[in-house]
Image (tube, helix red, strand yellow):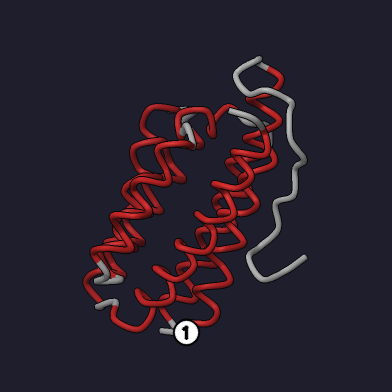
Amino acid sequence: MTKRDLADVANVQAHVGGELAARAAISISDQQLRGLRQIQAQLEEAYAADDDERTVQLNHEFHRAINIAADSPKLAQLMSQITRYAPESVFPSIEHWPARAIKHHRRILSALAKHDDKLARAAMADHLAASAIPLIDHLIARGVVAEGGALGTSRPGRS
């Protein structure tokens, strides 16, 4: 894979993830919101404890819970296929990523709690797009991803 390949995947992931979050904002129940808040609290504790394995698991649960709340099985299935290309296990070791992810997740939770589909879409799309560059840089530095291809990750619909 090249950095362009990963950037392409990240852009599609940001678009689909944003749509899933928007749909979740409309249909999410109070019980689902409580569950998401619990997952986020546990995730923040795991980050603080440098428990990388647990952070990966909880981050996956956080995003999966939103995808379930969206009640859009085909979009969620597509998202699952897209995320195969993003190795989640490296995120806890990327410098400054845990603090950024916590901030992003809180913004997503706030939008979901307000049932604001536009805010939720933007918050999730921004979160997923923001993860691309540090991930790609991390993978290039370790020789996992080839340098080839132009890198242009921006939120879908923006230049």
Number of dots carrying numbers = 1
Q: Position of residue 102 (x, y in %)?
A: 54, 52
- Tell me the SS state at disc 1: loop
- Residue 103: percent from left, percent from top: 59, 57
Q: Is residue 23 left or right of residue 143?
A: left
Q: Which residue is mark 1?
A: 116
Residue 117 shown left or right of residue 53 in the figure: right
Vertical side of 41 occupied by 53: above or below? above
Q: Quadrant of residue 11?
A: bottom right
Q: What is the crowding at mark 1: few (fewer than 14 residues within 10 Å), some, or many (at least 20)?
A: some
**Which quadrant of the figure has residue 127?**
bottom right
119 or 32, which lies in front? 119
Residue at left offset 41%, top offset 84%: 115
Residue depicted at x 36% and y 61%: 37
| Image spot of residue 83 (x, y percent) | 42, 43
The relative height of residue 137 versus residue 14 in the rendered view (above or below) is: above
